[in-house]
Amino acid sequence: MHHGVRRVTIAIVSSLAVFILLGGCAGQRLTMSNFDKLEAGMARSKVEEIIGRPVRCDGAMGAANCMWGSEQRYVQAQFLADRALAFQYKNLK
């Protein structure tokens, strides 16, 4: 049983480390300079190349509202058929 607990603990710590590292990378992409590269009509894949994968995307019937970052500092984008319609931001530097 002791070895099983140790494996679970190692797995949890490893997962948290990956999550923190990936979150840090995405956060570094949320800059005003990168926001200025985003354009209406841009493919969602191109947006993700610039600012990374969103932390949340909600949508239906070909429309999506995606968010990168947190409530304190973020980029939001609205997509229709995987093409950007509009972008908003808060607290970018």
Image: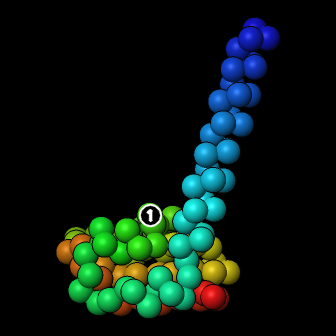
The residue positioned 71% from the left and 37% from the top of the image is: 13
The residue positioned 26% from the left and 81% from the top of the image is: 42
Q: Is residue 61 visible?
A: yes
Quarter of the image with the N terminus is top right
Q: Picture coordinates of residue 82 (x, y %)?
A: 24, 73
- When asked about the image quadrant of residue 81, the answer is bottom left
- Say if 50 sits above or below 3 in the image: below
Q: Nearer the viewer, residue 4 or 60?
A: 4
Badge 1 crowding class, 10 Å Cα cut-off, few under 14, some 14 to 19, many 20 or more, is: some
Q: Is residue 85 visible?
A: no
Q: Picture coordinates of residue 11 (x, y %)?
A: 65, 30
Does residue 81 appear to the left or right of 29 in the view shown?
left
Q: Picture coordinates of residue 46 (x, y %)?
A: 31, 72
Quarter of the image with the C terminus is bottom right
The residue positioned 40% from the left and 81% from the top of the image is: 77
Q: Picture coordinates of residue 78 (x, y %)?
A: 36, 82
- Say if 35 sits above or below 18 in the image: below
Dot 1 lies on which element?
loop
The residue positioned 24% from the left and 86% from the top of the image is: 41
Kindly identify which residue carries mark 1: 53
Does residue 14 appear to the left or right of 55 in the view shown?
right
- When asked about the image quadrant of residue 17, the answer is top right
As shown in the figure, which amino acid type bears the numbered disc 1?
Arg
Does residue 87 appear to the left or right of 75 in the view shown?
left
Residue extending farthest to the top is 1
